[in-house]
Image (cartoon, rainbow, N blue to C red):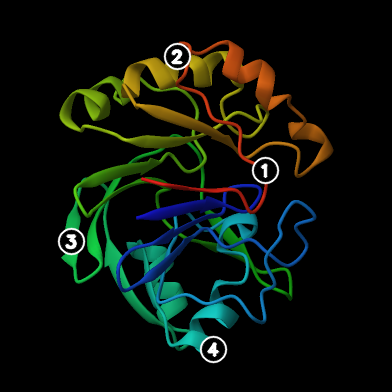
Amino acid sequence: MKVSYHGHSIVRIETGNKTILIDPFISGNDQCDLQADTVKADVILLTHGHNDHVGDTVDIAKRNDALVVAPVELANYLGSKGLNTHPINLGGSHEFDFGRVKLTKAFHSSSFTEENGNMIYTGMPAGILFYAEGKTLYHAGDTGLFSDLKLIGERNDIDVAFLPIGDNFTMGPEDAALAAEWTRAKQVVPVHYNTFPVIQQDPNQYVELLQPGIGKVMNPGDEFEL
């Protein structure tokens, strides 16, 4: 399994036969190295409905005939736009031909603002546990610190966790360091920082808060084998 990071909260997973994008906020994201009109995806996984996470989902999914997996209300909304969607609710999971997806809690909010300014409620926000090829990846989505992260860590052998550190809208570095401890992840990658002035952070300082060898700062386009 190849995993790459592409700025803000975008993670790309390449399994033996599928390319999976998580939260593809590409257009308008100066931190991203991808091009929305050329990026390939067989599957898009969404944590919640905010525009900086849904991003270019509609265009990418239509161009690639991609499956979109998202929390129920968000999946239903995107389905009304003509996308092929699969809804999952918090605590639920589904086995797909590309791996198993399970949604966890995330303490945040979730809505999508349309071009005309209408704000659509898109249900509960989520984190994502992704299981494939004997590996477990955890994308926490946008969240504050919450104690059930301990349970997620106890019940899953997490190979890599993507945790937000930007503060203001999500947990900041200190809380994210405790989240890393609680999830027991073998590797931790900081995400959701420096995209906007209000979430400026130094990811290297965050890594220094973690146990030696666990933190991994990734620049947009960096990848590793899991």
Q: Amino acid at mark 1?
A: Asn
x, y (%) of residue 139?
Answer: 42, 43
Q: Amino acid at mark 2?
A: Leu
Mark drawn on residue 178: 2
Which one is earlier in the sequence, the residue at label 4 or at label 1? 4
x, y (%) of residue 1?
Answer: 34, 55
Horizontal side of 53 relative to 104 (left or right) equals: right
Q: Which residue is mark 1?
A: 219
Q: Nearer the viewer, residue 101 or 143?
A: 101
Asked which quadrant contains residue 84, the reply is: bottom left
Q: Which residue is mark 3?
A: 94
Q: Secondary structure at mark 3?
A: strand
Which class describes the residues within 10 Å of circle 2: few (<14), some (14-19), or many (20+)?
Answer: some
Q: Secondary structure at mark 4?
A: helix
Q: Amino acid at mark 3?
A: His
Q: Which residue is mark 4?
A: 63
Residue at (45, 21) in percent of width and height: 214
Quadrant showing the C terminus:
top left
Mark drawn on residue 163: none
Which one is earlier in the sequence, the residue at label 2 or at label 3? 3
Residue at (35, 72) in percent of width and height: 18
x, y (%) of residue 27?
Answer: 73, 67
